[in-house]
Image: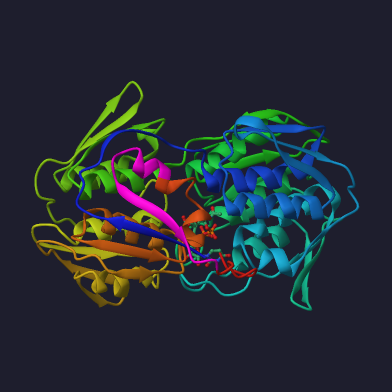
Amino acid sequence: MDKLVIEGGVPLRGEVDVSGAKNAVLPILAATILADGPCTLEGVPDLRDIDTMLRILRELGLDAERGPGGTVVTEVRDPTQCRAPYELVKTMRASICVLGPLLGRRHRAEVSFPGGCVIGPRPIDLHMAGLEALGAELRLEGGYILADGHRMSGREVYLGGAYGPTVTGTANVLMAAVLTPGTTVIEYAACEPEVTDLARFLCAMGARIEGIGSPHLVVTGVDRLRGTRWRVIADRIEAGTFMTAAAITHGDVTIRGADLAQMTAVVAALRRMGVEVDRCPEGVRVRSLDRIHPTDIVTMPYPGFPTDLQAQFMATLCIADGNSFVTEKIYPERFIHVAELQRMRARIRKEGPTAIVEGVDFLSGAPVMASDLRASAALVVAGLAAHGTTTVDRVYHIDRGYERIEEKLEGLGARIRRVSDRVAVPADAEA
Ligand code: EPZ
């Protein structure tokens, strides 16, 4: 298993490229199950989660291979395969995204029911209710969702839950609906840019979807979808992570390819923290000259502040000049990073879904680890500013969602290196 060793205290400077968005690519790859003919995706990051999805697609009878320069080509070879096995699904919850396209195109699916998750309960009841509203028959047997979509037809589907809409649930219902006869109306659809990118990809394949980008989607079923070529959007969470890395180190970083239009809440938070954020021809320039100001952050569905940047912002606020409140409204238990940040001298008190962060003068490097991708990224961000050496263990979590993170940070001047202790990553290392 690899570790990242960071000598903190270097202000990051220079330019860095953002990769394609993991959470856009995963459902888009699943959507290629729907296509008659080959699909070529561009800007696909080299990540463990993407490899997992490619393996699932192969299990489902697709040729799915990486090509040069971040391309992936998929094509259905054997449309009779309908089983997404436990061995793969247990390593990545986003595997559930194959349920909708399998039902829409093959009218049958056997998908392992996703298990527990370190960031708290992650039910799929809304996915199932949404597909059932379209007429799919679902039952749970032997740990698998066994689904029959032969009697599906366009209906009204409501996707709101206790914590707002569901991102991958919206993707699943959308992917099931595009080939389903009649008109499907999805109310309270997730509006995340990754869902929008999926909807646009489906339209490029020939789907008919109105209301893209809004919580009200109207889908008119079509008979067939063709293969197409698609460049995925930039990863706003990776971009936001680099923004916090620039902010916490009092750096000056240009993030090439970042799309500010998708990051309004994030930019507003940075500006409240006294960080300068400017659009530039390449993307966005982030400068942090003064001590970080405290601010309050509440995670919410898009266009609110994203839960996937909560941990990285909390790390940054640890050295603010005062107290901040960080409230998690999507995953109220997503605070695995708190105890690790405390090991680095952070002063954080948790009260229910809120963390009260009392700014300290400096963080102190320490050996730390986390079992959630974004929590691990937050520890790297903290390590970049901490006094002394920080060792972040279990880097395989970061490798699930950040492409060559140490190379990109090194390019900005960070003193960071990857070391291997020759212990293999567990085969079932989880999502
Ligand atoms: C997506 O997960 C992302 N994953 C997550 O990113 C992200 O944190 C999350 O959306 C929220 O933005 C992918 O896109 C692959 P949800 P998803 O369904 O779709 C509740 C990362 O670090 N809910 O929108 O699984 C749920 O418990 C990952 O890259 C139900 O109650 O999230 C949560 O409170 C982690 N019933 C809220 O809704 C359901 O059936 C939003 O979850 C589904 C969800």
Write the residue at 34% across / 64% down. 391
Residue 99 placed where, x, y %?
Answer: 73, 57
* Residue sitting farthest toward the top: 281
Residue 390 placed where, x, y %?
Answer: 29, 63
Q: Is residue 409 magenta?
A: yes
In-image side of 5 versus 13 (left or right): right
Write the residue at 56% across / 41% down. 45
Residue 224 image-quadrant placement: top right
Residue 394 placed where, x, y %?
Answer: 47, 66
Q: Can residue 398 be seen in this view?
A: yes
Q: Does the magenta stretch include residue 404?
A: no
Q: Is residue 385 above or below residue 352?
A: above
The region drawn magenta spans 407-422
Write the residue at 54% across / 50% down. 189
Q: Is residue 299 visible?
A: no
Residue 358 image-quadrant placement: bottom left
Write the residue at 28% across / 58% down. 383
